[in-house]
Image (cartoon, grey):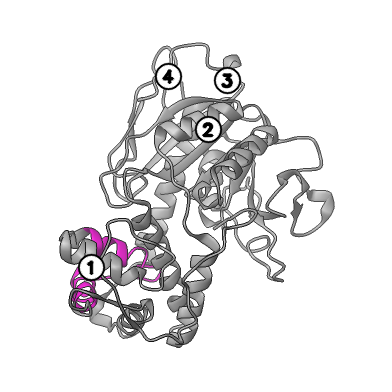
Amino acid sequence: MIGALSVSSMSGVCSGAKDPVGDVSSIKGELNVQSEYFIGDFLSLHGAKIGRRDDVKQIMTYHSDNNDWSITSESKDALITSLLGLLPAEGAKIHNRVFLEAVRDWYCGLDSGSKIDNAVAAKDHLDRKGHNIARMILEANYDLGGSSVRVLDVGGNDGILTSNVAYHLGQSLNVPVQPYVLEIETGVSWDHNSNTVSAADNNKNEPVKTIYYDGRDMSSGRVFGPEDNNPLADGRGFDCAMYQHSLHHFPSPEIQQESLKQIFGLLNDGGVLTISEHGSALGSSELDLMHMMTEVYSDLHRDPQMSVNELEERYNAYVERETPANYFSQESLRDMARKAGFTPVSVTGISERTERTYSMTFVKNAESILERHRDLNALLDSDALKADVTKFETKSIYAGVRSLDGVF
């Protein structure tokens, strides 16, 4: 996931040398996500005092499922019982390390009876999600691009979702799609997705390629591979761009605003921007913890033999680099995009699940293609980009009846 520029320095994150139990006077409602006692504080408040066990279960097991298998609900319940059982008596705190060790032991100790094969479901989920995003893009501007379409996924990581979106755009528009992921240059020498990730074979789309940039100026980015293939240098621009839960990782509202401004400059007239985010009605510490747990499970899945010391180091490094994240309401996102020059076209409702996701779509210089009535509540979200659930019900934003499958 992308970050940008500098993140404020972290206080209170330790290397594991401190005594895991500390004295405190009380648990406060406003939690410090960068505290070395944050996980225990969170569980004490939300799991014990407020009694939000189902929400805590969702937060503490967020993305513990993976492309290989899902974990049974009963096993997830067992983890929460174990974590809440570690909480101290009133007046004491427990170090994050204690809870990370419990999560590690639980995750790495799961037996076959605790797992459900997930390969087909995961593939179907990504396909459905890519289809939904492509539909939102086409709803905003069906006349996207021309003889080919370029897609830019800001913070798209491994590019797998990008490839799914590109595939469905290509299928609907019957033109080749060139998908790109934009990430910050890390200095790490790795192949990433530039030669490995491609959309489903429809004899049209190119493989996903990564554009690396310095976190400040997107136009200065370079493609992994031949420089003469850099789409930032040939003057063609992009036809659509997307942030899939990545905009909140930019370290300040000012940098988020600058990112949207730069994306506006990279898009062609009529270009579509679609953004999926978390509603700020949910406490930011909860969303931060969900993302932190995603990183924990990713590390453990990649290396089941990882020591507790290394897991703690990785956790602390993520906290220092990525938190606190900067979340925003639908209204704030709409205003930020408008300030960057975009016209809002559609917005989903905020899902009722713990992660409180929503999606919003915008068009650059929309007057040329959206001369008729628009309804900002045209898209109604039942469960926000979840597999096997209808993403949205839609009313036409154009005169007459339209099909989102490519036929007017």
Between 214 and 182, the one nearer to me in the picture:
214
Q: How many marks?
A: 4
Q: Secondary structure at mark 4?
A: loop
Question: Where are the magenta residues, as a range?
Answer: 55-84
Q: Is residue 19 above or below residue 379?
A: below
Q: Which disc number belongs to residue 397?
A: 4
Q: Does residue 178 appear in this view?
A: yes
Of circles 3 and 1, which is in front?
1
Instruction: Using the rendered image of the protein, determine whether residue 406 is visible from the camera's viewpoint.
Output: no
In this figure, which residue is indicated by the disc labeled 3?
A: 366
For the point 57% across and 43% down, the residue is 256
Residue identified by numbered label 2? 336
User: Which amino acid type corresponds to the residue marked 3 in the rendered image?
Assistant: Ala
Mark 3 or 1, nearer chain start: 1
Which circle's residue, 4 or 1, is located before the other in the chain?
A: 1
Could you say where residue 346 lies in the image, as x and y percent from the top left? 43, 28
Structural crowding at the residue carrying mark 1, measured as other residues with C-alpha within 10 Å and reported as few (<14), some (14–19) or many (≥20) = many
Nearer the observer: mark 3 or 4; the answer is 3
For disc 2, the neighbor class at 10 Å (few under 14, some 14 to 19, many from 20) is: many
Q: Give the CA distance from mark 1 to mark 2.
A: 36 Å
In screen coordinates, is 371 left or right of 152? Answer: left
Mark-to-mark CA distance, 3 and 4: 13 Å
Q: Position of residue 133 (x, y in %)?
A: 46, 41
Residue 74 in magenta?
A: yes
- Looking at the picture, which amino acid does disc 4 mark? Ile
Whichever of labels 4 and 2 marks the residue nearer the N terminus, that label is: 2
Q: Is residue 301 magenta?
A: no
Label 3: few (<14), some (14–19) or many (≥20) C-alpha neighbours in 10 Å: many
Front tag of 1 and 2: 1
Please state the horizontal and vertical placement of residue 369, each as a whole percent of the image: 57, 17
